[in-house]
Amino acid sequence: MRIDIITVSPELIKSPFEHSMLKRAIDKGLVEVHFHNLRDYGIGSYKKLDDTQFGGGAGMVLMIEPIDKCISKLQSERNYDDIIYMTPDAKTLNQSVANTLSLKENIIILTGHYKGVDQRVRDKFITREISIGDYVLTGGELAAVVLCDAVIRLIPGVLGDEQSALTDSFQDDLLSPPVYTRPAEYDGMKVPDILLSGNFPKIDKWREEKAYQHTKNIRPDLLDE
Ligand code: ADE
């Protein structure tokens, strides 16, 4: 998989890809992540990227021309399955979207800033818009990192234990059941006997019940879906 991230602040988001799981996935050749500084496509000697909005109102809007130049250059080099725009005014990211994106060959992620991008960018280029939650960040960069993390860990071979992505919270629209490790008793708090029983069918059933109860208490909306 290849991910091209277009941003006005590449330095802000490079480091998460230099550590831990994301770095391992890149080192293993399972994913390539390329950063494109929108400033390189800015207009005139000042490399202008944004302007005030027509109709008045606070906040600057990213202009279409620099974004067009950057996306068109990338599109001239390869085909893209999806061109994604990170924005709070979109459907929220969920596990199903992450699963879908993990199967793509090439994607572009465009991150907004200020008041966002000229609507014509969205109309002309964007095939998918994603919010990471109902709150507004200063830019889409951190949202892009969240999306990349959620997607890249699902690429086969990225996680050491292949099972663990399958038993994540949300993979079956249920939150995860509680987990315990040694010691079996700490400060009078005991690990549930069932988990020490060695009876794996019973343990599976217990986990299912706990996951269901936890989901019902915390996120009943997931059960409605
Ligand atoms: N840009 C600003 N806020 C965002 C959000 N919540 N999700 C995605 N992109 C954003």
Image (spheres, rainbow, N blue to C red):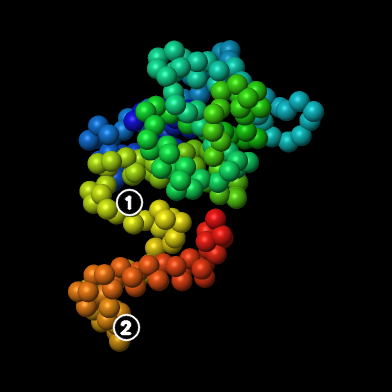
Crowd tier of the residue under label 2, counting other residues whose Cα lies within 10 Å: few below 14, some 14–19, many 20 or above:
few
Q: Would you identify the image quadrant in which residue 107 lies?
A: top left
Residue type highlighted by circle 2: Met
Q: Which residue is mark 2?
A: 189
Looking at the image, which residue is at 47% across and 42% down?
A: 97
One can see residue 15 in this view: no
Q: Is residue 215 above or below residue 104?
A: below
Q: Check disc 2 and report its element: helix, strand or loop.
A: strand
Looking at the image, which residue is at 28% across and 73% down?
A: 202
Residue 104 lies, in percent from the top left, at: 39, 31
Q: Would residue 114 appear left or right of 23 to someone viewing this image?
A: right
Query: Mark 2 to mark 1: distance in Å?
Result: 29 Å
Residue 113 lies, in percent from the top left, at: 58, 34
Residue 134 lies, in percent from the top left, at: 60, 50
- Badge number at residue 165: 1
Q: Would residue 192 appear left or right of 135 to someone viewing this image?
A: left
Crowd tier of the residue under label 1, counting other residues whose Cα lies within 10 Å: few below 14, some 14–19, many 20 or above:
some
> Who is closer to the viewer here, 198 or 165?
198
Q: Is residue 34 above or below residue 70?
A: below
